[in-house]
Structure formats: C-alpha cells, structure tokens
C-alpha cells in the first residue's frame, strides 16, 4: 500500500508521555501481558513491528491443549499448568474456542496400549475438568471416527482438548488492553531502547516513516523468536545471557473429505505425532513438523520436503490418501524455545522462563512459552511488574471474558460454554433473518457478542455496504480497520477472518488489491 495519512490509532505518542510499562512484541505473550497490566491500572504501550500475531502466534496448530506427548519427556509441571488453562480460556472466549474430541488409532508398533492408557489417565487427572469429557478406549469399527480411517485402524483411544482461532485470540487480548487504556501500535518497530537509571527511552519508527521517542519506567521484551536479537541489536549495554532454539512447525490445509467433525492424533513412524484437525468448516488442517530453523524468523515457509512428510504420514492412516496436489494452503511458524541442549527438536521444552534484570531501569524478558499457557505467563509477569513498580491491582483475567465472550445478553445462563455459544449463534441468526446465516455464523465465531458493532441494525445485505471480496463487506472491513488494527489485506484475509482460504489461488492477488483499495479509502477518510 502507498503511504497515507496516519490513522488516529497510528499517531505517534506524545514525547512527554511516560508509560509505566512499554512492551515490545505483539504476539500472544505481549498482547496478554498488555491486557493484564492495563486491567490492573497501569499505563501501557505495546509496539509491534508487523501485524498483531503475524508470525508464530497465528501459525500454530490452533490448539489449547495440555500436550499429551510432553508426558513422555517428563514435563508434568508444564502439562498440569496447560491443562488447568483449557477450561479457564474456554469460558473466557467461547466464540473463538470449542471443545474438540481427539481420536488416536492404536498402533502397537509405536507405543503399547498400557502406556497410552497411563498417559491418558494422567491427562484426565492432572487438573480438574467440568466441561471436557473423560478419555476412553474405543472400537473404531463402530465409532464414527473410524469411517475416514484405513481398515487397519480397529482400536483406538479418545480424549478432549480445545481448538482456538489463534490469531483472533491475540487480537482480542490487544482489544481488551486498549479498552482498558493501553496504547497499541502496529507496523511500528522499536529501533532502539536506551536504558537509564530509572527509565527507558524507546525510539519508534512510525508507520508513516517518522520517528518518535517514548519513555517507560519498565520494559518488557516479548519479541518471541526475536527476543535475543532485539536485546543484542537494539538495547545497547544489556547483557544477553539466554539463547533461543528456533524450531519450525509446518502445516498444510486440504479440503475436507469426510463427515466426521472431530480430530485425529496419529503416531508417526519416527515416534512423533501428527494432528489432523477440522478447520473453518470446509477444511482439514494437518501438522506439524519439528525442524531446526537456522534462517531469519521474518520469513518462514514450509519446505516441499515437509509437505511431503505431512502428506505421507497422514496417508498411512486415512482411507483417502493426501497428496501435495490437494494442498490449498501451507504455513509455518517458528517456535522460540529455550535451548535445553536436547538432541531432538521435538523434545525441547515448551515451558517458559521469565527473566528480570534490575541493574538499572527494570527489564523483563520472556523466553519460550506456548499458546496454551499465555494467560498464566502474563499473570506471572504482571505480578513481578507490579511488585517492582510498587503499583497496580490484583490478578483478574481468570474470570474475565475476552471481548465478545460475554454472551449473557443473548443466552440463558449455562455451565457449558459450548452450549451457550450454539444458543448464541441461533439467537444472532434470528436477530438478522435477512442476512446469510453463514455470514452471521462466521460473525458470531469471530466477534462473539461484539458482532453487532458492525452488523448494526442491518435489514438486508446492502445495509452492510458493498461486498469487497466474497464474504467481506464494507461494514466489517471498517470495524477491522478502526477497532482491530488491520492495515493490510493479509491482516484481513489470513488473520482476522481466514477468508483467504476460500479464495482460489489465482484470485488472491486481485482480492488483495480490492481490499487495500478499500482500506486506502478508509484510512484517508477525514472521519477516521
């Protein structure tokens, strides 16, 4: 896109402003910390060099899960922590999360049945559950999950985890942070962080090319895969003692070819596991790999060898083989893992470390972590920050809905967040009888109870403005620009809505041009 007048949310902060905390990094950890801190009454600035969730946080396996396979590596503390978070997050955001049944066909050559039963027993009992069902042994010859599987898959096991829209999880945390007073700046790299005795001075490169300086009493380094390089390159004088191990996880997406709406977990011949997940109604998501990533984390793509690996491993279990020609989209994310010197990338710990440096103006660096434990990581981070700064309220996020997650005005009280969401979709569709039910259902899933903020009082599709690309109308785009920091077409197509999946590859370039033209008009409008 060409340069355009600064949107009000992109305007440089006043050079006289002093924030309590500046956060560098707009992934899930940075957004989660910004939300928690601002809700405790601290003044917060978050800057992100690209889009929110553009990298690791939107390129995950889309799961809130304990990590069943981590039990094999003795990571009981991490698994317990993650299992405790599943239902906490499900209740906070029932619109972007849903319980998901996983089925693991038993392959005796991989792991004995007793070992799997023991692992599932621990998985059931390491943390309390009120919504998710128990694990079970199943006969795949009579279970609906057996229909897509090869005839050799006779016995198996089932258990439950939670599926999430990872990119929207980040955006909703940022939105809640902003609603509590935080300043969120996207497309705004921090080019230098100078440390004083009591404050940090940060140099920011604004979206319009100008430079701004802000002050903060404390700095949080939540740069994910860039956490070590940010300190080395942009924070002179800071001693960098940690090293990250970057591990690439690649995924492929194919058209959905079977009716079963649950997930599979397959044991691979190399003793790794493979997820086969329902996604966005009409697609199947297959992943992931664990490959050392030695290049820059700025641009990460699956290799052809990884695509072949995923197709081959999935085809070992499925009746309908998966080929590279079936792939409609591929993506990869780099996991910033603490280097524990494990020989196998799959066994590197997924736990996190919070490192404090109080030698001058305080610094908190976030090393490692995973999507599932982001809220707990943020809570622990904020407890340390509050103690250090001597101000701020108590922890609050465990019981607070994310934006759109409070469905109480639309549904009867329910202890089951999934049931409440299904009722909400029905109520929203009844409220907008003239709109396409599929559009209203997608609006419900993306925005929850905030969907009405752009659906308004629409009595016909035309009330939402022109259709810019299939499924996207002007009213929604305006909301994404003004409320969710969308600045480029891919922010909309691949992170805020996932509508890019439904576009044939040959139409994607034209769709980007149409969206960016509409965004240009919005961002240049005097009313915005």
Image (spheres, rainbow, N blue to C red):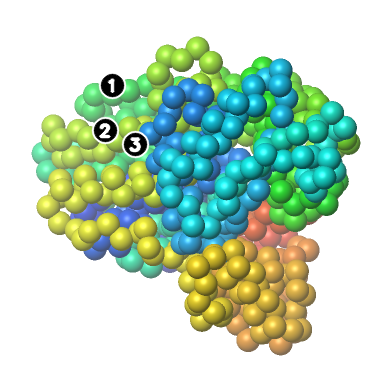
Q: Nearer the viewer, mark 1 or mark 2?
A: 2
Lower position in the chain sequence, tag 3 or tag 2 = 2
For the residues bearing labels 1 and 2, Cβ distance under 8 angstroms: yes
Above or below: residue 315 compared with residue 256: above
Residue 461, picture quadrant: bottom right
- Counting from the top left corner in percent of width and height, residue 476 is at 63, 70
Cα–Cα gap, marks 1 and 2: 10 Å
Asked which secondary structure carries label 1, the reply is: loop
- Counting from the top left corner in percent of width and height, residue 215 is at 22, 50
Name the residue that disc number 2 marks. 355
Residue beneath the point at 27% across and 57% down: 395
Residue beneath the point at 44% across and 56% down: 88
Name the residue that disc number 3 marks. 366
Above or below: residue 241 compared with residue 179: above
| Residue 281 as seen in the image, left or right of residue 240 | right
Along the line of sight, which residue is nearer the eye, 405 or 233? 405
Lower position in the chain sequence, tag 3 or tag 1 = 1
Cα–Cα gap, marks 3 and 1: 13 Å
Asked which secondary structure carries label 3, the reply is: strand
Circle 2 packing at 10 Å, graded few (<14), some (14-19), many (20+), is some
Name the residue that disc number 1 marks. 241
| Residue 266 as seen in the image, left or right of residue 392 | right
Asked which secondary structure carries label 2, the reply is: strand
Residue beneath the point at 26% across and 49% down: 382
Residue 38 visible in the shown view: no
Cα–Cα gap, marks 3 and 2: 7 Å
């Amino acid at each position: 896109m060409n340069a355009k007048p600064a949107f009000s949310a992109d305007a440089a902060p006043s050079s006289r402003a002093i924030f309590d905390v500046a956060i560098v990094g707009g992934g899930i950890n940075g957004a989660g910390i910004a939300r928690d801190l601002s809700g405790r009454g601290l003044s917060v600035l978050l800057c992100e060099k690209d889009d929110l969730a553009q990298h690791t946080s939107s390129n995950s396996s889309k799961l809130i899960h304990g990590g069943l396979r981590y039990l094999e590596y003795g990571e009981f503390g991490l698994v317990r922590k993650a299992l405790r978070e599943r239902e906490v997050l499900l209740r906070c955001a029932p619109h972007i999360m849903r319980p998901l049944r996983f089925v693991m066909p038993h392959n005796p050559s991989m792991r004995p049945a007793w070992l799997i039963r023991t692992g599932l027993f621990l998985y059931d009992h390491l943390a309390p559950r009120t919504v998710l069902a128990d694990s079970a042994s199943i006969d795949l010859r009579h279970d609906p999950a057996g229909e897509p599987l090869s005839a050799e898959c006779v016995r198996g096991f089932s258990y439950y985890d939670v599926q999430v829209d990872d990119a929207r999880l980040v955006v909703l945390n940022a939105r809640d942070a902003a609603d509590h007073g935080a300043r969120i700046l996207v497309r705004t790299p921090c080019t230098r962080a100078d440390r004083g005795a009591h404050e940090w001075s940060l140099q920011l490169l604004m979206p319009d090319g100008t430079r701004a300086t802000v002050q903060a009493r404390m700095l949080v380094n939540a740069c994910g895969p860039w956490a070590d390089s940010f300190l080395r390159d942009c924070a002179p004088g800071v001693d960098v003692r940690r090293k990250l191990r970057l591990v690439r996880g690649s995924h492929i997406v194919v058209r959905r070819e079977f009716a079963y709406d649950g997930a599979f977990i397959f044991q691979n011949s190399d003793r790794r596991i493979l997820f086969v997940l329902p996604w966005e109604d009409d697609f199947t998501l297959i992943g992931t790999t664990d490959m050392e990533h030695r290049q820059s984390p700025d641009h990460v793509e699956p290799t052809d060898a990884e695509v072949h690996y995923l197709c081959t491993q999935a085809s070992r279990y499925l009746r309908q083989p998966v080929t590279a020609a079936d792939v409609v989209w591929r993506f990869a994310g780099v996991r910033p893992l603490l280097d524990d010197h494990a020989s196998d990338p799959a066994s590197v710990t997924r736990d996190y470390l919070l490192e404090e440096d109080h030698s001058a103006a305080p610094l908190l660096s976030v090393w490692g972590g995973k999507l599932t434990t982001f809220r707990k990581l943020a809570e622990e981070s904020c407890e340390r920050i509050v103690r250090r700064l001597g101000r701020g309220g108590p922890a609050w996020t465990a019981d607070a809905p994310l934006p759109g997650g409070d469905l109480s005005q639309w549904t009867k009280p329910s202890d089951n967040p999934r049931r409440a969401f299904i009722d909400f979709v029905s109520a929203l569709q009844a409220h907008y009888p003239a709109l396409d039910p599929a559009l209203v259902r997608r609006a419900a899933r993306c925005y929850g109870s905030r969907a009405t903020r752009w659906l308004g009082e629409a009595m016909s599709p035309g009330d939402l403005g022109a259709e810019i690309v299939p499924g996207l109308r002007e009213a929604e785009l305006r909301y994404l620009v003004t409320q969710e920091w969308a600045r480029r077409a891919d922010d909309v197509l691949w992170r805020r809505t996932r509508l890019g999946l439904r576009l044939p590859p040959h139409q994607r370039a034209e769709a980007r041009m149409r969206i960016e033209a509409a965004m240009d008009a919005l961002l240049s409008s005097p009313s915005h």
